[in-house]
Image (tube, grey):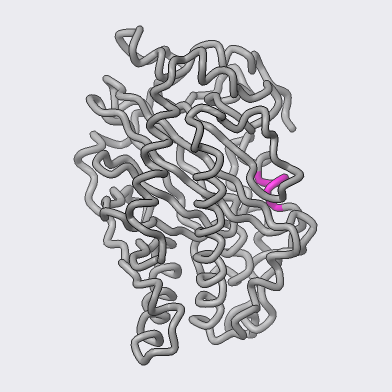
Amino acid sequence: MAAVVSAASSLAKSVQELAINTSGPPEKYIRKEGIGGSPSEFPYLDIPVLDLSLLNSSSPEAEEELKRLRLAFSSCGYFQAINHGIDTSFLDEVHDVTREFFTLPIEEKKKYSRDADDIDGYGNDTVYSENQTLDWNDRLYLNIKPENKRKMKVWPENPTTFRKILLDLTAKLENVNEILFKAMAKSLGLEENSFLKQYGEDPIVLSRFNLYPPCPTPDLVLAAKAHGDASAMTYLLQDKQVEGLQALKDDQWYKVPIIPNAIVVNVGDQVEIMTNGIFKSPIHRVVTNPERERMTIAVFFTPDPTSEIKPVDELIDEKNPKFYKSVIDYTGNYFKFFQLGKRPLDALKV
């Protein structure tokens, strides 16, 4: 891991505290070039809404839904999942426990602070460079799987239901993830386990609970800088009311709309590699809101770091030559490049 510059200072004051106690963001958060306009002025991205119950069926409608899945992931890399099998009442519990945690007193939350050289736990940006522009958010990162990677000292015991709800959410999303891995393969005319074979025996599941406090200068500060996900698949529970997620398509930033009780699904870099570039890992960012805080929950599914990730052979031919090299432990490589301001995928292009 790259050297950490004053990492402890990133935990000294939460962004939540800065939002309450300062008149404006410190200079380290200001993007002098701006973000390209006011967040409210960007157009909406036309994201397909897919019925997961159809993707997991043998009905005549399933073939049409598979075509829409392929179109979604090959065009913008996103879709919004409905009929995903997770009860609305349970999603409400996930949102409620997230809000309960972030509304705890600061000192209570800091009991679960991450170590200076680790991402697991409560905190905000690790400072890798004196010139780094920081993101306007606090978050709680937790490794969920493999179980031996869990750092239970930073798993909140307050709220008391937090741990159980997180494990229940993971189990439910694991079912969704398997359905989608098989559906993605079938949508490309492949045997349904083609991508699962690369997923490995000990895949990684990582959660990130996000708090984005209000920011008085939304045209100059980002809640999360532009990036692609190192995962294979990402599942996002959006805030029920406050927008913020934006996706880049054709060099234009678009707002991702809120659909109540839908799960926002995007492919990560490792699925882009597996599909030889057919499915696109979207570049996305989060903007701030001048008046309202925003809370979201993201769960990342990543292949076993010992598995070789490479384009599936059936997707390579004279017309579609191999676009990416194979890689082991893409996530480890990802952070090395991301800290240097480069897109890790670019380093793997043939």
Residue 83 in which image quadrant? bottom left
Q: Residue at x 44, y 43 (%)?
A: 297
Q: Residue at x 67, y 76 (%)?
A: 312
Q: Is residue 183 left or right of residue 59?
A: right
Please provide the residue range marked out in magenta.
Answer: 330-334
Residue 231 visible, this orientation = yes
Q: Is residue 146 left or right of residue 131?
A: right
> Which residue occupies the extreme front position in the image?
160
Q: Is residue 305 magenta?
A: no
Q: Residue at x 28, y 42 (%)?
A: 243
Q: Is residue 240 above or below residue 175?
A: above
Q: Is residue 225 above or below residue 343?
A: above
Residue 84 in which image quadrant? bottom left
Foreground: 106 or 278? Answer: 106
Place of residue 127 in the rendered image (x, y in percent of width and height, measured from the top left): 60, 22
> Which residue occupies the extreme bottom position in the image?
60
Residue 246 visible, this orientation = no
Q: Residue at x 64, y 78 (%)?
A: 193
Q: Is residue 180 above or below residue 33?
A: below
> Which residue occupies the extreme left position in the image?
41
Q: Determine the main secondary structure of the stretch shown in magenta.
A: helix
Quarter of the image with the N terminus is: top right
Foreground: 84 or 320? Answer: 84
Foreground: 112 or 126? Answer: 112
Quarter of the image with the C terminus is: bottom right
Q: Is residue 331 magenta?
A: yes
Q: Is residue 275 left or right of residue 259?
A: right
Place of residue 321 in the rendered image (x, y in percent of width and height, measured from the top left): 64, 77
Place of residue 93 in the rendered image (x, y in percent of width and height, measured from the top left): 38, 44
